[in-house]
Amino acid sequence: MKLLGIDLGSREVKVVVIDNQEISKQFKVSTMSFYRDYCNFTGKIVVDLKKLGVEDADIKISTGYGKNNTDLKEFETINELKAHVYGVFYQTELKDFVLLDVGGQDVKVVRVEKGLITDLELNEKCAASCGRYLENMAEVLEVPLTELADYSHNPVELNSTCAVFSESELIGKIAEGAKIERLCAGVNYSMYKRLDPLLTKFKGKRLVLSGGVAQNKAIKDYLTQDYQEVISLAEPQFNGAIGCCYYGILKQ
């Protein structure tokens, strides 16, 4: 049985194929390229599975902002929270955890107990606590995101709560002569400070990280102050698409 999961996110589209309960294919495409190169326009945007090279799947499930742009005669759609929780089930086999998913333009915090969602918190209104914030700040500092993610010690103080004004504040710190290591740490710590209020009522033993920010070592280090165990998924950016497939497996 071959299953196809597509997570049509705001910044990227992630595609996963699971065959005989093992991941056989996974790839991601920028949202702009995806809609330009892998969709048909016949009065409505519809994903072209042949162009994607995944047309032979037996079960197809989609999630994310653009989930309804799949052919709903072929696809079942599920909400993002369910997809990401099922992704954690597949990748870790855990049934009790708090999930922090930091996407390009939103943040999801979900408490799962005995395999059931018991509480959640969402931030879809401000980019300052999302992955896009780190991308913008890395561009200002002219460093790769992978380098930015390494620094957590002795951060410069960045207090602005707005993603746009934070850039101006960071440029001010650059003009004061702050070292790049402290500037990068300041960006990471300011991100942590924005996430902390969302996590306040979810403090506990085990935190699972998904989304691109799960690869940020500095933010993970800060979060270890609040949790006994912080787990970064092996495939954090594909977690939603993996969850779609695993949901399909359980429905068989």
Image (cartoon, rainbow, N blue to C red):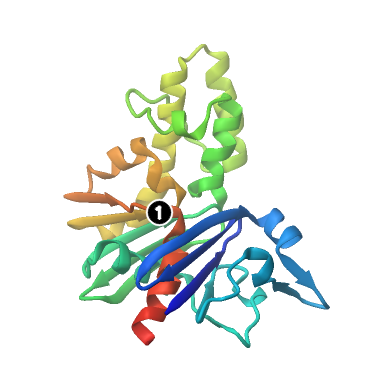
121, above or below 196, in the image: below
Q: Quadrant of the N terminus?
A: bottom left
Residue in the image at 83% along x and 78% along y: 43
Instruction: Tell me where residue 47 sits by quadrant.
Output: bottom right
* Residue 182 picture location, percent across and down: 41, 21
Residue in the image at 50% along x and 70% along y: 5
Instruction: Tell me where residue 19 sits by quadrant.
Output: bottom left
Q: Is any part of residue 18 visible from this angle? A: yes
Label 1 environment density (alpha carbons within 10 Å; few <14, some 14–19, many ≥20): many
* Residue 97 picture location, percent across and down: 24, 63
Residue in the image at 42% along x and 66% along y: 242
Question: Foreground: 152 or 17?
Answer: 17
The residue that label 1 is drawn on is 236
Residue type at mark 1?
Pro
Instruction: Tell me where residue 147 sits by quadrant.
Output: top left
Q: Is any part of residue 106 visible from this angle? A: no
Q: Is residue 91 left or right of residue 96?
A: right
Q: Secondary structure at mark 1?
A: helix
Question: Foreground: 30 or 136?
Answer: 30
153, above or below 239, in the image: above
Q: Quadrant of the C terminus?
A: bottom left
Residue in the image at 37% along x and 79% along y: 249
Q: Is residue 43 left or right of residue 158?
A: right
* Residue 131 picture location, percent across and down: 51, 47
47, above or below 196, in the image: below
